[in-house]
Amino acid sequence: MPGYSRSMLDAAEDNEDIEMEEMTVFTADEEKVNLLLQEGTVTKRTDSEGDVAEDSDNSTAVSHRRRKTKRQTWKNVFVIGFAFMISFSAYGGLQALQSSINCNEGLGFASLITVYMSLILSGLFLPNAVIRLLGVKWTIVCCTACYIVYPLANFRPSWYTMIPASVVVGLAASPLWTSEGIYVSASAYILTDVSDKENAGAMLGRVFGFTGFLFNLHGIFGNFISATVYRELLTPEERHHEEPGVVYTCGASNCRDTNGNSTSYCYPPPLSATAVVLVIFISLYFVAILMLLFFLDKLPEDKEQRIKDTPLLASTVQTMILWKDYRLWMLVPIMMSDGLRVGVLNGDFSESYVSCGIGVEYVGYVVLCSFIMQALASYPSGLLTKYIGRLPQLAFGVALDCVLIIVMLLWDPDDRVELYFLIAAGWGVTHALIIVQLKSFLGLFYPDKPSAAFANFHLWGAVGSCVSFAMSLMFCVSTKLYILFCFQLIALALYAVVECIFKKREKGKPGSL
């Protein structure tokens, strides 16, 4: 498809000026004109022949061009949002299954650790270099295509297939998300130029809100697909298999190794069923790539050139520029807690509770429940900030986290399906409260360095996930839960201190910076 560009707007305005200059404007003394009209010597020109008609035609043409640009830009916003929703439905659904379908020797956990370690390195060094080389659109297309290697590796899961595939995914992740943010931001500014009603800030919020809504649907669709396929294809024996004479431990007592004997429940579903899931996920990737190839227009040349003029290691500098601020280090624990929570839900809870207790076919449904509650809790959390502030909501989120951890420590998983969904729903609410409030606080606390603040947010979240998956290979589930319990309380206490510093700064007290 032909690409749109910001030059369309400039051309429209230039054409308008040229047409106005070429118009012949006749001026006369007002009394003479009236006299001639009264005598009938001259007559008024009709609208179709006069300047008023020409002005109307020009205004209509400009308005038409603006509407066309607006439609084309919103089309691009929808394409990129929908394509990301499709592709991450595949990746998110497969990530939630790793600890269950690749549980032998901890391969699933190891692959997730590798993804996040590669993502950390990628975020520091690769985004600007890749985008300068390929451009924004082709970075999105090529990095999305890189994700296909992950489901392909799962057809023959081994250390020689999964680890290299995980490296590729991790390295592609950061350029992908950086280019997506650049594209959506540029689209918002183009829409601002053709809109007379909204400023840039309002339009940015509107566009990012729309793409964010589409993206968050991935957790629902991806997990629903995997859960439905396994439920339809697996026999009752395959859903929850127990080897004769082998004692498995579920829940908090699940350990990787005890005196040389693994007590971890590990019975992957048949490859025939998993292959169906993988084929569907690969198909989703191809649909997303084709959408991006044929329906996503390239960014305007001036936007692309601005990126090429950005220093090569700008993303690295932006991330590290805040490391000299001691207050950021006080926020690192609560930023890491998000990644730790993701590791518990997608790793320990999926394997040691859901798969072990009621079967792998329920993993997708349970994780889906968590995403639904996260979506439902996010918007009310933002509204409540005006009335009760951030700290009470964060305190409630951490308290709920601690309650869930205590339940998981004391509960021996059984066949009461509703309990698994309740715990997952609780994790979803906690995740929404902490993410919404922490992001809003970072934007307020670092108003002049928002890029650096959010770069650190994603970096330390990835570190948290990496640590969480690594602990799953080294410790029993109970040990990890105790560590998470204490870490959450420390993180909340440190955040409360920084919140107090922020309030003092807002009141203008000296020495608070």
Image (cartoon, grey):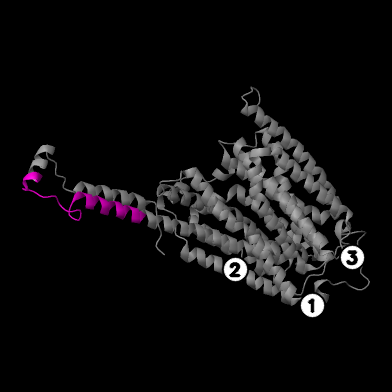
> Which of the pair 425/237 is nearer the observer?
425
Q: Nearer the viewer, residue 192 or 99?
A: 192
The amino acid marked with disc number 2 is: Leu
Residue 210 placement, left or right of 399: left
On the picture, is 466 further left or further right than 206?
A: right
Q: Which residues are magenta?
A: 37-65
How many angstroms separate mark 3 from mark 2 (CA)?
A: 36 Å
Q: Residue furthest front?
A: 38
**Is residue 475 at least partly visible in the picture?**
no
Q: Marks 3 and 2: CB-CB under 8 Å?
A: no
Tell me, yes or no, whether the highlighted magenta stretch contains residue 61. Answer: yes
| Amino acid tagged 3 | Tyr
Q: What residue is shown with label 2?
A: 284
Q: Nearer the viewer, mark 2 or mark 1?
A: 1
Taking the spot 75% from the left edge, 41% from the top edge, the residue there is 395
Q: Residues within 10 Å of mark 1 (few under 14, many from 20)?
A: few
- Residue 259 seen: yes
Principal SS element in the magenta part?
helix
- Residue 114, given in percent of the width and then of the height, sits at 70, 57
Q: Nearer the viewer, residue 106 or 356?
A: 356
In the picture, the quarter occupied by the C terminus is: top right
Residue 421 to residue 336: above or below: below
Question: To which residue does mark 1 refer?
Answer: 235
Q: Residue at x 70, y 41 (%)?
A: 332
Q: Earlier in the sequence, mark 3 or mark 2?
A: 3
Residue at screen point 45% across, 48% down: 189
- x and y, in percent, of residue 212 in the image: 58, 54
Gap between marks 1 and 3 measured at Cα: 21 Å
Tell me which numbered mark, 2 or 1, is placed earlier along the sequence. 1
Q: Which mark is residue 248?
A: 3
Picture quarter containing residue 215? bottom right
**Does 169 lie within the magenta span?**
no
